[in-house]
Every structure is written in C-alpha cells, then in structure tokens.
Image: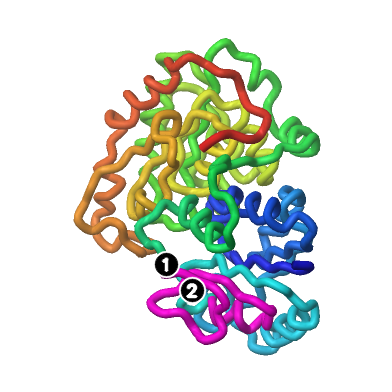
Amino acid sequence: MRRLAIVRSLHLGDLLLAVPAFRAIRQGFPNAEITLIGLKWSADFARRFSHYVDRWREFPGYPGLLEVDVDPARTEAFLREERDHGYDLVLQMHGNGSVSNRFALDLAGKRTVGYYDPTPPDGLTLGAPYPDHLPELLRNLGFVELLGLPIDDRRMEFPIFPEDEAALAEIVPDGLFTGSGPIIGLHPGARPPARRWPPEYFAAVGDALGEKYGATIVVTGGPGEGGIAPEIIRRMSHPAVSLAEKTTLGSLAALISRYDLIVSNDTGPAHVAVALDRPSITIFGPADRRRWAPLDQIRHPIAFQPVDCAPCPHWECPIDHRCLRWVTPEQVLPIAERLLSAPGDGKTEGSCAA
C-alpha cells in the first residue's frame, strides 16, 4: 500500500475519537502515504497529528453530505485530482456509509473499505454493517479490525507544542495560574444551541466551586460564542476570567492541560479534556450519550436526565429544552466535588488512556 486515503470530513470531537483508529492504521501501514480528507478546520488537526497523517485535502462537498455546500464543478475537479493521485486503499470513516460510500468509491482507489447501511454498495472491497450500538471510539476501532489490525490500544491523545504554550501566554492575565486553589474551566458553548446547558446553571456551578475551593474560574468559548461568557460572569458573585473567542485550538488545549476540572457541554473541548486526561464533567442533552460519552466514567463522568424525546437531531429545541434544563447544578456539584477531592496524579503532557 503506497497511498491511502481516510475520508472523515467531520468536527473536532469526531476526529479525536478516531485518533486510536488512525494510530492503528499508521502502525499497520507504516510506509504508506496517508491522506486525510476533512473539513477546512482539520488542516490544523492534520499538522498536529503529522505522525499519523502525511497529507491533507479539503473535502469539497458532495451530494447528500451536509457538511459543505455542493459546488458540482469544485467536486468534480477534486475527484479528478484525487483519482490522478492514485490511491491503493480508500477508508470511508464518515458515518454509516449510506452516502459517504459513494464519495469514497468516486475516488477510484484500487480498494475501498467502509461500513454500510443497510447493504454494501457495488464496488466496496470490504465492509460490515454499521454498528449503531457502539460508542464512537469503539466503532472506529471496529472499522480498523476489518483491516485485520490490532485494536487493543484505546488511548486518546492531543499533542501540545511550544507554540501552543506561547499562544496561551499571550492571552492569559498575569497570575492566572499562581493561585493556591484549583483552576476550573467552564465551557458553555456548543455549535448546536440545543446542546447548551443554561448559562445561569454554569454560573451557579462556578460560584459554588469558586467559593468552596477558592478556585480560579475560567470561561471559554469558540468562534461566535463570545457573548455567552459575559452573561455567565455577570451572573456570578465569585470572580471569573473570560478567554472566550481568544484561544486557538492549540492554546485552548494548553489551557485545559492546566485545569483541575472542566465542566463542559457535549462538544469538542470535552473530548480534548479526555485526550489530555484532565478531570471533566460533560453535560449531555439531546446527543446520544451511548455514542459520545467518554469510556472512562470515573475520571470523566457525564451528567444527564433521561427524557422521552432524547436523543434527538434538532439544532434548536422545539419545546422546553427539558433534556438540559432538568440537569440541575445540584446534580452536577457533587460530581465536581468528588473529582476535586480525588487524589491528584499530576498534569499530563498531552496523552492519556481513555
């Protein structure tokens, strides 16, 4: 195998949960050029994980895949270029394959492997029914098992580079990391509003933990989420620092590596915390917790309330958002106190066993 392509044009958590599979693929094909076909943001991911990915190509959009608007001319030009590149093996790791297998097959590799639902398409060299019941990390490793590769290494990882530390140093206030109490992060954002725990709940948790432990409270947020942090801080009586919309992916990871605890919605930074083995609580609402919750529920527990309408695919809740409003601060605080009172094992250097 000289040239190998991985199709996974998804978001941060999706790619982090595929890292154990990427590791196994690299070990199984140590001399192959491995290309990741991903969303625009994942160019940074490919650079960060260059020990597993040699080449990155931006996913151009494809009919039926919703992540990118379709421009037929752009898609056709991309497919021509990648066909000319000449893949020996194309690995479709983008969902259940109902549409993404067609894209993978259009790359015209000598062999194509992928999950399928409900039946394998013509041209698929190797596949298996999509295992909808498995956690995402194990689903990805199950895919690798199709290739006959070992799947016993479940470690997540997130390398932190000196430039990430330098970027963090440029935005943190002086003395942020020198207090005697724990450093606790609150990450109240998420791309779908339906996944956001109410700001007043985050404020209540930040206040309670800040007062009890003398904690330094840091509120973060990604692009477009800067308005949530001031709302939380305004509701708090304990001092808090906002770094919302100020971090890059790397500097955010460097920040999380210093946390004694992070409380987050079900979104990418929660998976970064698992990859860095920093204690975390993830608040689950409409997403399928069987699929997305961390495997280690001792160090990375989740908080949720079972409701009849979850899991659901809604971007915004059409009713009363009960899946998250019924998860109260009083439910989350005992979990946080347990994690903060657990014996410390030091802060990691960028990888962990999940």
The residue under label 1 is which amino acid type?
A: Tyr
Residue 136 versus residue 196: which sits nearer the camera?
136
Residue 279 versus residue 138: which sits nearer the camera?
138
Name the secondary structure under disc 1.
loop
Q: Position of residue 330 (x, y in %)?
A: 28, 29
The stretch drawn in magenta includes residue 105: yes
Task: List the residue tagged with mark 2.
Answer: 97
Relative to 5, 214 lies left or right:
left
Q: Position of residue 11 (x, y in %)?
A: 56, 58
**Residue extending furthest front?**
148
Q: CA distance from mark 2 to mark 1?
A: 8 Å
Sequence-wise, which precedes: disc 2 or disc 1? 2
Find residue 81 and report its image quarter. bottom right
The residue under label 2 is which amino acid type?
A: Gly
Q: Does the CB distance between marks 2 and 1 fall below 8 Å?
A: yes
Find residue 91 and report its image quarter. bottom right
In the rendered image, the vertical position of residue 311 relative to residue 256, given as above or below: below
Residue 294 versus residue 188: which sits nearer the camera?
294
Q: Position of residue 118 (x, y in %)?
A: 38, 77
Q: Position of residue 253 (x, y in %)?
A: 64, 38
Q: Residue at x 41, y 45 (%)?
A: 293
**Residue extending furthest left?**
308
Find residue 325 and report its image quarter. top left
The stretch drawn in magenta includes residue 155: no
Task: List the residue tagged with mark 1.
Answer: 130
Few, some or many C-alpha atoms within 10 Å of disc 2 (few <14, some 14-19, many ≥20)? Answer: many
Tell me which segment is drawn in magenta. Answer: 101-129
